[in-house]
Image (tube, helix red, strand yellow):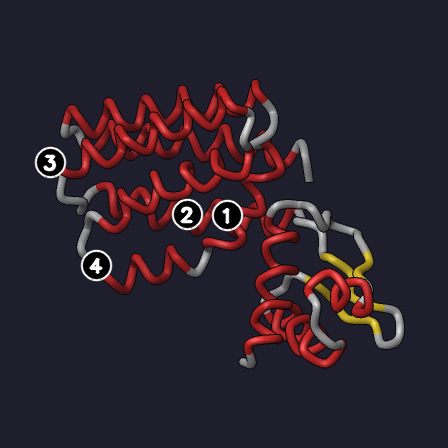
Amino acid sequence: MSTATSRAYDHVKQAILDRAYPGGALLSEGEIATAVGVSRTPVREALLRLETEGLVRLYPKRGALVLPVSPQEIADVLETRELVETFTAGRATIGPELVGELTRLLEDMRRHADAGDGREFAYADRCFHRSLVAATGNEILTQLYDSLRDRQLRMARLTADDPVRAADAIRDHTEILEAVRSGDRRRIRAAIHRHLQTAGSALRGRS
């Protein structure tokens, strides 16, 4: 992918994940080209790639429609997350290193919530869960989880700017961290399950 295409791709993708380009928005190749400072050709190539990733749908001579997060996508992602996260909770290496990492990320979430920074809050939230998955040392499972990254971040931005939802998420993550500290794997799985159920209810209310 050329440098110009990469710039256009990164610009549009980040704007979609941040909801600067919300679901249902119709994007113009010309406007994107002007914003990024490139010609239309790399913009078209970038949009084609984003279409294969399920983020936009191209309409010749009209532009690209940002696809909204659908109820089915929410259900599919949460189901996959629960399978991976509850399984890896039983395999993760639990110790001071993991506890320290989760504690740091939870503090990041609190700080970003206090600052009203939904983007960084969503990123810290996602990193918290990934740390648990990666603690298994299973690279294939971690790569599978990483493949959900963009969908997770985009979904998280649906609710990350809501102070009530942010408070709920911090409460849930505190429970997960306390369960990890206890070393009780059944308790960890139960805390993850409750969190994903709560998150799912909030997301379905915003989709």
- Looking at the image, tell me whether mark 2 or mark 1 is earlier in sequence order: 2
What is the distance, in whole Å, between disc 2 and disc 1 at their CAs?
A: 9 Å
Q: Nearer the viewer, residue 84 or 119?
A: 119
Callout 2 amino acid: Arg
Q: Residue at x 33, y 33 (%)?
A: 105
Q: Which mark is residue 93?
A: none
Answer whether labels 1 and 4 touch (C-beta < 8 Å): no
What is the distance, in whole Å, between disc 2 and disc 3 at their CAs?
A: 23 Å
In this rendering, the answer to whether 206 lies above or below 84 is above
Which of the image's four quarters has the C terminus? top right
- The image quadrant that residue 106 belongs to is top left
Percent position (x, y) of residue 82?
Answer: 39, 44
Residue that mark 2 sits on: 81
- Looking at the image, tell me whether mark 2 or mark 3 is earlier in sequence order: 2
Residue that mark 1 sits on: 152
Which mark is in front, 3 or 4? 3
Callout 3 amino acid: Gly
In this rendering, the answer to whether 120 lies above or below 32 is above
What is the distance, in whole Å, between disc 3 and disc 4 at their CAs?
A: 17 Å
- The image quadrant that residue 6 belongs to is bottom right
Percent position (x, y) of residue 125?
Answer: 42, 37
Residue that mark 3 sits on: 95
Q: Residue at x 64, y 73 (%)?
A: 46
Q: Residue at x 46, y 53 (%)?
A: 149
Callout 1 amino acid: Gln
Answer whether labels 2 and 4 touch (C-beta < 8 Å): no
Which mark is in front, 2 or 3? 3
Callout 4 amino acid: Asn
- Looking at the image, tell me whether mark 1 or mark 4 is earlier in sequence order: 4
Q: Dot 3, how many residues are within 10 Å of its Cα: few (below 14), some (14-19), or many (20+)?
A: few
